[in-house]
Image (cartoon, coloured by chain):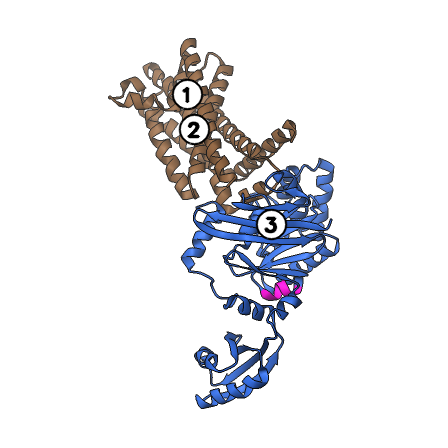
Chain colours: A blue, B brown
Amino acid sequence: MDNAIKVKELTKFYGSLLAVDHVSFEVRGKEIFGLLGPNGAGKTTTIRMICGMLRPTGGTAVIAGFDVSQKPLEVKRRIGLVPDVSNLFGELSARVNLEFMGKLYGLDKKTRRERIDQVLELFQLKERQNDLVKYYSKGMHRRLTIAAALIHRPEILVMDEPTSGLDAQTARLVREIIINLNKEGRTILLTTHQIDEADRLAQRVGIIDRGSLIALNTPEKIKNRTEGMRALEIKILNGVDQQRWIPIIKEAEGVDKAFPAEGKIRILSKDLSQIIPTVVNLVDKHGGKIENISVAQPTLEDAFIHLTGKSIREEPMSKEGDVRRRLARSGLR
Amino acid sequence: MKPLTSLMHSVWIAENDLRQSFKSVRHVVWSLLFPIFMMFTFSFRYGTTGPDKDFINFLIPGIVGMTAMFGSINETMSIVWDKSLGVFDRILAAPVSSTSIIVGKTMAGAVMGVISALVLLIIGSMLFSVTFANISIVLLIILLASFSFTGIGTIISGLASEPREAMMLSNLLRFPMMFLGGVFFPVESMPMPLPYVSRALPLTYATEALRAIQTANTSIVFIDALVLLVYTVGTILLGSQILMRIMTR
């Protein structure tokens, strides 16, 4: 299997709202592919179309050789979907939840029992298997959601924001699980708005913004897309309000982008040797003192900013637009 | 997909729905408490013995029909809850046809209607010694009525965008239906033009048929059963259309 997922010109309109705009990419067999983008960029809509839960307005998605528009059931049989919110039946126990999923995926009774025991063991849920899921912690919910997606041993695992909303420890555990599942030979398509997650997990990354795919490559190569751009980080003494300095620094010659990054100001430029003295002088002229200055490796975030002109952490659109989009997606208009 | 597999999918979806409804005992008790309460209130108000025996004979079939309505419509509301909790996505992502999903949800609604109605039927007949001429026809009417109420429920849950809206819509239908469906007062005694409204409601035919079974009035039972069947087919077809549109957006 060369390409597990082949998406071509995939487009989705919700009424007049363009959520996904002619997106094309391929996920190779046995790789981890990350769709990276801010909230509301169209990631979830894209994967819902791939999983056959939403009909594309245009374009095609071929999964394991089956066109999702023509053979949705064949596609669904080969995909395990882990949604962004745990959507298990809260009034039922973990075991009954898994039992139900096993039935829907056509597993016979004996296989069901074996697989359920296996995943409960693997995700350390065996002791609580008969408790109602509504009493589970967030981390247990997430583990059970992944377990439920694995019950039919899918070739392809699609995960929507697998670690969002989890504490650091659980997020790390989930990342380990993802890496192990990939080592076992499973193709994984995941979405994330966390740059370091895409960088750490994905072998290839597609950056999606406002419904369009704007970059597609390995994280390394995308970072190099900053086209000779280098990064500089400065911290200004007494500059509690680093924000105030950004417009000033942006004015300096040779500065391509300047934006706040964890209490510091990150500057992107093609020519560091030229801008270092310029920036130092500029800060001095405005009565500031530089506490710390360092040259940094370009990150995926730099590439994102370079490509879109904005930070991935910023809300990409008005709250209202985001809410509208989310409602449209969930089918609640 | 093989028809048997599709049917099994429906059965499992229905089973899963009902399992959740019966899992919380409280939920079941609460939903039955209302018709039981209504039954006792009206029987105390009008008496149950002597010449008043007629009233209780009138009341119990009405209550049974009403209970089927509440049970079925309540159960189909699970579609709206499932949608809002995201669990509907779980079924949508599984290799199950849209038809199986709709059939499963419909089965769950009908089963809930029948079970709730039977509980009230048993309580009512035991406490007030109300008898029916033919119990299998009673079951048939309850089943038909439950299916038609389920159809109404699927229409509501297809139209409603969130649970609260569904609750309001269903109450908007259930309460007028309860008072105009001939549960507590005979349709004939209603002032004009209410009898016409009554004749448009499936509950009216359900209660009328159940009463006609008591007096073994076969022609009325037959006509009412036919009307309920038409209602069932109509509402389920319309409900499925609406749900299908949601599922295949």
Relative to A254, residue B83 above or below = above
**Residue at the right extreme of this rendering:** A184
At label 3, the amino acid type is Lys
How many marks the image carries: the answer is 3
In screen coordinates, is B133 left or right of A140? left
Q: CA distance from mark 3 to mark 2?
A: 49 Å
In the image, residue B65 lies at what x, y percent? 42, 24
**Residue at the left extreme of this rendering:** B192
Give the chain letter at badge 3.
A
Give the chain letter at badge 1.
B
To which residue does mark 3 refer?
A: A8
User: A204 or A57: nearer the eye?
Assistant: A57
* Magenta-drawn stretch contains A216: no
| Residue B206, disc | 1
User: B56 or A231: nearer the eye?
Assistant: A231
User: A19 or B3: nearer the eye?
Assistant: A19
How packed mark 1 is, by other alpha carbons closer than 10 Å (few <14, some 14-19, many 20 or more), is: many
Q: Are marks 1 and 2 in contact (CB under 8 Å)?
A: yes
Q: Are marks 3 and 2 in contact (CB under 8 Å)?
A: no
| Residue B159, disc | none
In the image, residue B13 lies at what x, y percent? 58, 35
Prevalent SS, magenta region: helix
Kindly report which numbered mark, 3 or 2, lies closer to the viewer in this rendering.
3
Q: CA distance from mark 1 to mark 2?
A: 10 Å
- SS label for mark 1: helix
In the image, residue A212 lies at what x, y percent? 53, 57
To which residue does mark 2 refer?
A: B69
